[in-house]
Image (tube, grey):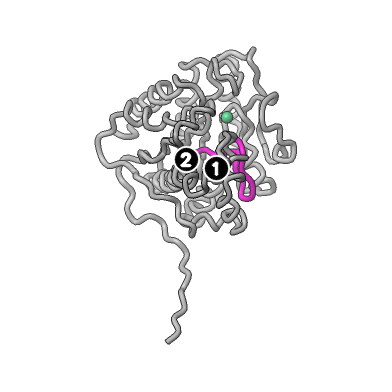
Amino acid sequence: MWAFAIIQSPKPPEHIPEVPIAYHHGYNITACGIEKLHPFDSQKYGKVFHELNIQGQYIVPSKCPRSLLIAVHPFWFLLSLCYSLQIFRAIEVPIFFLPAPVLRWRVLNPMLLATHGSIIAGCAAVTNRKFGINLSGGYHHASSTSCGGFCIYADITLTIYWIRRWYPEAVKKVLIVDLDAHQGNGHERDFIKCPDTFILDFYNDEIYPGDFIAKEAIRYGDNFNFEHTDEFYLEKLEIALRHCIKVFRPDFILYNAGTDCMQGDPLGNLNISSSGIIKRDEIVFTHSIENHIPILMVLSGGYQKQNAATIAKSIKNLNSKFNIYT
Ligand SMILES: [Zn+2]
């Protein structure tokens, strides 16, 4: 007797833990020591998690299933990740000599976990009507059809796709607030002509990626450099958030909270202090909570060893103000 597989659309998670923070110890990337060749502190997720000392059940993602990925990434793109050279191009370390199964285990699997973490933490934000935090993710250089800059899966596009699909009454208009030092060209390319997605991007225009096509998707953008102080940056941010929320009236905020704009970062080349980063995050959360807009925060870039301590301090500060996990 012939049996035909019925392809069912994935369902939203049935149970979301009370603590809306996603973390898996597998987020941390190790690949026989070669990860040290990249300036990225690939262990920062675990350091942040341990600093937070979360009591209670948090979100533990699984590897993002293909049934979710395929909604955004075409099959040929996923197939191309079977080849070491393609992964090498994206993460920019000389790993092309490693066999693909090793790469899948050490590089792709952490990113698949983090991608699922963004999606589930996004669901948590929608269902608790407040917030979710993924202690990884924010792969803002990855689009549906291309990867680069240490980003492979387009977790931002995927999260927006699935929360719109699963909670259509609650989420129609999404505001992306991208405060990583780099231009978020991945999600920008994906939402370039999408009126229901508003992109606010603060970045250093003199560094990677300089994607002029993607810039067309930015509806509120500002460029910063090493000369700009915390005060200048935070004042611009206040004005920007007030304006974007007023004119666009989003149902959901996806906050790409990269910390590579912090002083001393060799790639971001901006000059925001650690306390400036903490204030920045508080400003974004305050605007979202005062306007009753659910927010998902993802960590994105931040390449120095000291970034984990600042991120943990910032999330503790958010918790003290907004009761995120206690
Ligand atoms: Zn960055």
Which residue in the rendered view is the most extreme toward the bottom? 1
Instruction: Residue type at mark 1: give it.
Output: Pro
Residue 273, percent from left and from top: 51, 15
Which numbered disc covers residue 250?
A: 1
For the residues labelled 1 and 2, say whether their Cβ atoms are less than 8 Å apart: yes
Q: Is residue 122 visible?
A: no
**Which quadrant would the N terminus be assigned to in this image?**
bottom left
Ligand 1: give its quadrant: top right
**Res 103 seen here:** yes
Instruction: Please identify the quadrant where the C terminus is shown.
Output: top left
Q: What residue sits right under mark 2 in the picture?
A: 293
User: Which one is in front, 307 or 214?
Assistant: 307
| Residue at figure coordinates x 27%, y 42% from the top left | 57
Magenta-tinted stretch: 137-149
Rendering quarter of residue 85: top right
In the rendered image, residue 275, in percent from the top left (x then y), is placed at 46, 16
In the shown orientation, is residue 85 left or right of residue 322? right
Relative to 308, residue 275 above or below: above
Whole-percent x, y for residue 229 in the image? 58, 13
Q: Amino acid at mark 2?
A: Ile
Residue sitting at 51 percent across and 35 percent down? 255
User: How many C-alpha atoms fall within 10 Å of the one at disc 2: few (<14), some, or many (≥20)?
Assistant: many
